[in-house]
Image (cartoon, coloured by chain):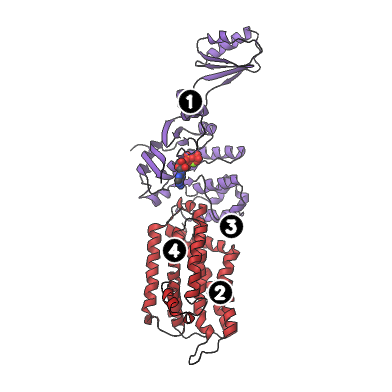
Amino acid sequence: MKSPFIAVSKSEFILYLREPSAFFFTLIFPLLMMLLFASMWGNDPFPDEEFGYVDFSVPAFMGLVMVTSFIMSFTTSMAAYREKGILKRFRAAPVAPFSILAGHLSAIFAVTVAGVILLLLAGILFYDLKFWGNIFEFIFVFLLSSAGVAAMGFIPASLAPTARSGTVIANILYFPMIFLSGAALPWFMLPDFLKDISLIFPLTHAIKLMQEVWLGGPFLDYPVHIAVLLGYILAGLFVSAKFFRWE
Amino acid sequence: MDDNVVTVQNLVKHYKDVKAVDGISFSVKRGEIFGIVGPNGAGKTTTIDCIAAMHRAYSGSIDVLGLDPVSDSIALKRRIGLQQQESEIPDRLRLREAMELFSSFYEKALDWKMLLEQLNLWEKKDSFFSGLSGGQKKRLFVAMALIGDPEIVFLDEFTSGLDPQARISIWKLVRNLRDQGRTVVLSTHYMDEAEKLCDRVAIIDNGKLAALDSPSDLISAHGGYTRVYFNVGEGFNGESLSLLEGVESVINDDDTCALEVSVRSVIVEIVKKLDAMGQGLDSFRIEAPTLEDVFLNITGREVRD
Ligand SMILES: Nc1ncnc2c1ncn2[C@@H]1O[C@H](COP(=O)(O)OP(=O)(O)OP(=O)(O)O)[C@@H](O)[C@H]1O
Ligand SMILES: [Mg+2]
C-alpha cells in the first residue's frame, strides 16, 4: 500500500498544473504585484535603515502567495469537490478526511513554495534583495505562517457546501486580508483602527513575523504572533476534525 | 455463527423531514447475489449507503462482516466496495491516475490494469474523466468498487445507462464475482436483470420491505396467472374456453383473446379446442409471469414522485 496522503498530494498537484487560472493567481499575480510596487519604490534603503522597500516587502508578498493558495484555491476547490460528489466518492474508500485535506493542502503548499521561489529570484535578480536573518529560523517561521493561514482555510474548506458558497467565503476572507494585513499594501500605511482590525487575521501576524525574522529579529521576540498562529492551527484542526462534511 | 455477511435490523433513516427508510430488516448470505428493487425514492440507495458506512446517523442495527458501519467505518470500507448511483472524480484526472490514486487507499489492491481491461476501458486509460461517456463513467465506478479486492461488492444501479453489450458483459462479471466467493448486493430498475442474476431479491416500497425471496418463489407467490394470447376473427366467442378447468378468465377484445390460466396443462386443451374450432394458431403466444409482474402487483401501478 502506498500512502494515501502521498497519493492524494500527487494527484492534486497534477490537477493543479492542469488548472491555468489557479496557476496564474498563485504564481504570477503576486510576482506582478511585487514588480509593480518595486518599480515605483525601488530598493534603496529607507532613511536611517539598512533595508529598502523590496527587502521589507518580499516576506509580505510571500504572505500574498500563501493566502492566495490556502484561502482561494484550497477553499474553492474543496467546496467544488463537495458539491460535485467527489468527496462522496472518496468517502466510500477507507481513507480518513484528514488524508484528503492534508494531501490536497500539501500539493497547494508545493505550489506556494514555487511562488515564493519566483519572488526571491525576481528580488535577487532585479533589486539586489538582501537577507539579515537566520535561515533556519526563517524557514521555521515560514512553515508556521503557512500552517496558520492554511488552518484558517481549513474551516471553510471543511464546511462550505457548494462551489458558490466556497467562492463567496473565500472572497470575503481574501480581499480584506490582502489589503489589511500588509500583503498587498505596506501595513504601516494603514490608519490605526484598520491596524487594530487587521490583528484578527492570521495573515497579519504571519507577515509581521516573517518580516521581523527576515530583517534579523530572533523569532522568540514575537510570542504574540506565534501564539495567534498556533491558535489558528488548533482551531482549524479542531473544526475540520469535528465538523468535516463529505457532502 | 451463521453465514450472513450483512444483517440489518429495523433500519430507520431520516433526511430532515423525509423518512427514507422505515424499519427494514433483512440479511444477506455469504456468496449470494442479492438484489434490491423498488420504485424511485423507495429507499434503495439509502439502505445500501447505510450498510456501506456512508452515513453516521440512523437507527436500528447493522452488522457487516462482524463490523459496525458507524464505529468501525474505515475497517469495514477496507473489506467492501461500493459503486454509487451517482458519483464523480475530478474532471481532469486521467483514468489511470484515478485508478492508481484509489489503489493507494487499500492494503491489498487488485491490479487496476486488469480491472480496466475487464470493464472494456483499457483504451480509455489516458482519457480525462470528463472525456468519458455516461456508460463509460458507470463502468469506471464499477472498476473502482472492485479495486480493493472486496468481500462484499455493492452496486447501486450498476447497469442504468449501459448499452445491451455492456450490460451482458457486466452480468458475466457479477457472476464471476460470486464464483470467486464474493457477495454481491445490487440495486436495479430492470426486472429481467434482477430475475436472471439474483439469487434473492428484496422489493422495497416506501422505505419498507415488501417482499424478499428467490425470483422463482416470488413469481409463484405473487406473479399471478400465466397468460395465453391469440388473434381471433370477427364473431369469435371464447365462452366455451372459460368452462375449461384451470382457465381463470377470458378477455375477448376486437381481435385478440387473452386467457389467464392457473394450471399449465390446460394450455393443451385450449390448443385442441381452438384447432377444432378452425382457429389458426399463428399468433398463439404464452406469457409466464415474470418478476416485473411481481413488482407491479406488489408496488402498484402508479408513478412515484
Ligand atoms: N440527501 C438527501 N436529502 C434529503 N432527502 C433525500 C436525500 N437522499 C434521498 N432522499 C430522499 O429519501 C428517499 C429515498 O431516497 P433513495 O435515494 O434511497 O431512493 P432510491 O430507492 O434509491 O430511489 P432511485 O430508484 O430513484 O434511486 C427519497 O424520498 C428521497 O427524496
Ligand atoms: Mg437510488
Q: Which residue is at the front of the view, A190 or B189?
A: A190
Kindly identify which residue carries mark 4: A154
Instruction: Give above or below for B90 relative to B183.
Output: below
Report helix, strand or loop for mark 3. loop
Q: CA distance from mark 4 to mark 2?
A: 22 Å
Q: Colour of chain B?
A: purple
Image vertical order of residue B149 relative to residue A122, above or below: above
Residue at figure coordinates x 56%, y 45% from the top left: B138
What's the distance in space between the residues labelled 1 and 4, CA to CA? 54 Å
Q: Position of residue B49 (x, y in %)?
A: 44, 45
Q: Chain of mark 4?
A: A
Residue B40 on image: x %, y %: 50, 38
Sort mark 4 into few (<14), some (14-19) or many (20+) by Cα contacts within 10 Å. many
Which tag is nearer the camera, tag 1 or tag 4? 4
Q: Colour of chain A?
A: red
In the image, farthest residue toward the left: B1
Q: Give residue B281's mark.
A: none
> Which element type, helix, strand or loop, lies under badge 1?
helix
Could you confirm whether marks 1 and 2 are on the same chain? no
Residue at 55 percent of width and 70 percent of height: A26
- Mark 2, ligand 1, within 8 Å: the answer is no
Query: For the residues carrying marks 4 and 3, which lies nearer the camera in this image?
Result: 4
Q: Nearer the viewer, mark 1 or mark 2?
A: 2
Residue B92 — which label?
3
Q: Quadrant of residue A230?
A: bottom left
The x and y percentages for residue B38 are: 48, 35
- C-beta proximity under 8 Å, tags 1 and 4: no
| Residue at 59% across, 79% down | A36
Q: Position of residue B274 (x, y in %)?
A: 61, 10
| Residue at 46%, 33% in the rendered image | B201
Residue ID for mark 1: B219
Residue type (three-letter) at the residue carrying disc 2:
Pro
